Image (cartoon, rainbow, N blue to C red):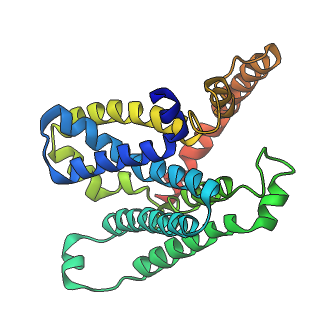
Amino acid sequence: MPLEFVRRYTPELMFIFFGLIFALVVSGLFEGEVAAFLTAALDVTPFVILAMLSYIAEGRGGVLRWVTIVWLFLLIGGIAAVAAGFGVLSILPAEVLDTGEFDLDMALLLLGTLGAAAASLIGLSRRLRVWLSRYLPIDPGSFVQGVALVTVLALILIPPVPLLVVGVPPYLSEPFIKLLTESGDIFADTVRINAYGLFWTLIASFLIAGACVRRTFPEVLERLGLVRPTGREVAFAVFAAFVLVVAFHFIDPMLATLVGYLG
């Protein structure tokens, strides 16, 4: 009976579990390694909550679908805010932010981020999903896959905006490089948090793909592409790697020349 209960209510239980993790991190009850381990889960928590809400809403419908859509909009807004924030910090010095002056690049950055966020909502279009179903294994009528498509589009379209507007990746901008050089422990912290984050990413990937919700473990592995490659696939991978190595032998000098020319 307990196992059957867990299988039946997996989305609800995972929703509560990750919501509890979020509450514990915000409350600050834990410190040290426990806090770092739980904090690393925050990167995937909004996405797991969105997936679980989608699974629950698709089965029950009604107001839960609107709750899921609201959470989806909040998530997209959060992604856009983070991307815009990093972009602003990478192009404007702190003294400009204090004066409240509005730079043209900042305006383009904000407009580009807003446009990318709005463009990602096209995934809600059933007509687009029907067209994509000709080439991708998706169900046009699935509420879960519609929400997933919007999320994927947001993650594809929004993050590159600062790079396209500014011309410099935010993490390679002068403010971030200065931060890294002034903090000696940040590298060690980053390695530890990345290791914890990898664990949570694996867990989240299986849950979002439907593990214990709609699919068996082998089905989830197949959905994630974690299957044994065929001989033809191995041969193609080796051939493609060889071609790329040869190609970049000529591309690298061209890129170096272009970067040097652009300054």
Judge left or right: residue 249 versus residue 75: right
Judge left or right: residue 66 versus residue 14: right
Instruction: Please tell me which residue lies in front, 103 or 252.
Output: 103
Task: State the image coordinates of residue 102 (x, y, percent, origin top left).
Answer: 34, 85
Q: How many marks?
A: 0
Which residue is at a point 12% across and 39% down the rendered structure image? 31
Task: State the image coordinates of residue 82 (x, y, percent, origin top left).
Answer: 38, 63
Which residue is at a point 20% across and 84% down the rendered structure image? 99
The residue at the far front in this view is: 1
Q: Is residue 144 above or below residue 68?
A: above
The residue at the far right in this view is: 134
Q: Is residue 174 above or below residue 25?
A: below
Task: State the image coordinates of residue 111 (x, y, percent, origin top left).
Answer: 50, 79
Instruction: Please tell me which residue lies in front, 17 or 117.
Output: 17
Instruction: Please tell me which residue lies in front, 233 or 196.
Output: 196
Instruction: Please tell me which residue lies in front, 152 or 24.
Output: 24
The residue at the far top in this view is: 231
Task: State the image coordinates of residue 164 (x, y, percent, origin top left).
Answer: 53, 64
Q: Is residue 153 above or below residue 48?
A: below
Q: Is residue 245 above or below residue 107?
A: above
| Residue 232 occupies quadrant | top right
Which residue is at a point 16% across and 44% down the rendered structure image? 183
